[in-house]
Image (spheres, grey):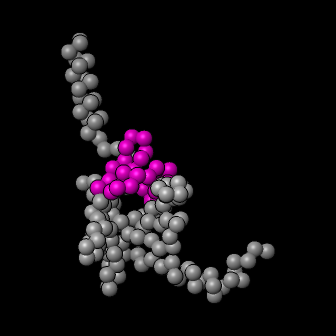
Amino acid sequence: MRKTVIIILQIICVFGCSKQNDLEENFINSENDCWVIYSQNQPNYSFWRFNKNKTSDNLLRNENGNLENFNTDGDLIIGPKKWKVSSDSILTWGMHKYDVIDANKNVIVLMAEEKETHEQFHLFLIKENKLTLRKGAYYFEQKRLKNQEKYISK
């Protein structure tokens, strides 16, 4: 009986420990999608793909509108970055650590802190189809400037 219990515990350990963190599964992209990352601190956004092998690739739209890997820009290495999510919901992504506030298959909300000011800010990861063209921050800035009357509360 004792031997049977030990075997069952070993089986549970093998299958339980090999299962990927459920939270991490939300980050992993398929071939047809990527994360568009928005920050409270910056008007622009960037494109990233989180891979099953725990690396992430920075993506950039080429002249044809397709997303391609953009991991290096001259001497600047942008990716691939290693990533992992701990059991207490802390995303380690490259040299940075973020609290995972909420996550599902389409949206992830992260919280970080500025090292110098200790001001907290949020990053928003929105899953997008790679073929969908996004309107840039400039579009929304100009829309607001040209149509100010639409933004007046009555």
Whether residue 133 is visible here, answered yes or no, is yes
Residue at 34% x, 78% y: name it: 61
Residue at x 49%, y 57% (from the top left corner): 116
> In the visual, does 118 lie left or right of 64?
right
- What residue sits 31% from the left and 44% below the top? 20
Q: Main secondary structure of the magenta part?
A: strand
Check the image and report above or below for 26 versus 125. Answer: above
Q: Is residue 71 above or below residue 121?
A: below
**Could you say where residue 16 lies in the image, as x and y percent from the top left?**
29, 35
Image location of residue 29, percent across then percent down: 33, 60
User: Which quadrant does the C terminus fall into?
Assistant: bottom right
143 relative to 21, above or below: below
Query: Quick one: which residue is furthest to the bottom in this view?
Result: 146
Q: Is residue 103 visible to us here?
A: no
Q: Residue 74, position in %: x, y?
A: 25, 76
**Along the horizontal axis of the image, is 21 left or right of 39?**
left
Residue 104: say if magenta. yes
Q: Give percent across and percent down for residue 25.
A: 35, 51
Q: How many marks?
A: 0
Residue lying farthest to the right in this orientation: 154
Q: Nearer the viewer, residue 2 or 145?
A: 145
Location of residue 52 with respect to 16 vertically, above or below: below
Q: Quadrant of the N terminus?
A: top left
Residue extending farthest to the front is 116
Magenta-span inclusion, residue 65: no
Left or right of 55? Residue 145 is right
Which residue is painted at 44% across and 52% down in the image? 98
Over which residues does the magenta segment extend? Answer: 82-111
